[in-house]
Amino acid sequence: MLAAGLITGAASFLFAASASAEPPTNQFSKQPRIRAGLYTTEDPVRIVCNHRAKVVKKNGKVIKWVKKGKVITLKYNRDNNKYHLDVGNFHKVRKSFFRVIPKKKKTAVCEIINYENRPSWNTALNDNKFRERLEVRYAPATNKIWVVNGLTLEHYIRGIGESGNQNDKAYLKSLLTAARTYAAYHKLYPTKHADEPYLLDTTGNDQVYIGYSFEERAPNVVQAAKDTRGRVITYNNEIVVAPYFSRSDGRTRAWSEVWAGSYPWLVSKNDPGCQGMDKWGHGVGMSAEGARYFAETRNWTWKEILKYYYTDIKIKRAYPKE
């Protein structure tokens, strides 16, 4: 987990943002939803929500309304290959999964009370709070039981912990726009985790999504997400592959230097903020260290940063305003 805003070396793909006058890409008719694979478990999952919540079937039919603060227990039982729901004395068993959905989406938060996810730099914290929907899902192809958080793209972006709350605003906006692009790209092309019940995982393999707990301690990150709402990086009006990484050794790499093929927006660039450093990551696209340098030393805007690292791109809305 990244406490100080360092980016992992994974081949992350993103987008950027631009003026509100820019038309949408028309690739999404409305804000998409993201499914984040939080962790695997063999244990019951105990959930408490701060608002009244409903437990529904896959088709949305309500099975049980639950008062706020009351424990909802979900479990997949390998012995009978069925899903179990317990709320007080209420017990239900089904072949299909249960989904917990609290009311008042804008303010609702659910806590997984038996999930320990404490950052090493402060074990007094426990990152176990999440917005919107929670469910337990069994993946036959991989034989794993996953806890999955389903939520809107903008709520997902607010919970990504790949930066620090005190980072420069322009840097935060460039990074979160890149993160939004990554998620939107995989929503359009959902092949990376095709055998799992989620779109993205919560590690550096995808993006370090922490959830609502990160929102609570990083209000500047939340504001940066709001300020760039819906914006993505495009080329020829298409949401593009836009890798980012931790730092270069003074220049970024073209796509063709690292992977097969080439993209005209991914060419090698001088990276003055990383002069004399060792490369950390694949080297393609935007370097986090370099982006911070341009924001803090050159006073570049977040749009200027993105347009430097990604050649001839445009920043557009991924979906219309809501």
Image: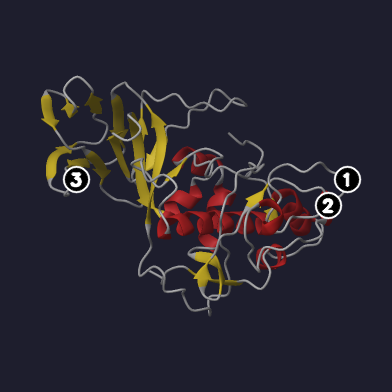
**Does any portion of residue 206 appear in the rendered image?**
yes
Q: Residue at x 21, y 37 (%)?
A: 97
> Marks 2 and 1: CB-CB under 8 Å?
yes
Q: Is residue 144 left or right of residue 6?
A: left
Name the element at disc 2.
Answer: loop
Look at mark 2 in the image and give the residue it sits on.
Answer: 250
Q: Amino acid at mark 3?
A: Lys
Q: Residue at x 67, y 38 (%)?
A: 4
- Residue 67 image point, x, y percent: 20, 36
Quote the CA–CA distance across marks 3 and 2: 51 Å
Quote the CA–CA distance across marks 1 and 3: 54 Å
Q: Earlier in the sequence, mark 1 or mark 3?
A: 3
Q: Which mark is residue 42?
A: none
Which quadrant of the figure contains the C terminus?
A: bottom left
Q: Residue at x 16, y 23 (%)?
A: 80
- Residue 166 image point, x, y percent: 67, 46
Q: Which mark is residue 58?
A: 3
Q: State the scheme by which the image is colored.
A: secondary structure
Name the element at disc 1.
Answer: loop
Local crowd size for mark 1, using a 10 Å CA cut-off: few (<14), some (14–19), many (≥20): few
Quote the CA–CA distance across marks 2 and 1: 7 Å
Look at mark 1 in the image and give the residue it sits on.
Answer: 276
Q: Amino acid at mark 1?
A: Gly
Q: Earlier in the sequence, mark 3 or mark 2?
A: 3
- Residue 161 image point, x, y percent: 56, 42
Q: Residue at x 39, y 68 (%)?
A: 28
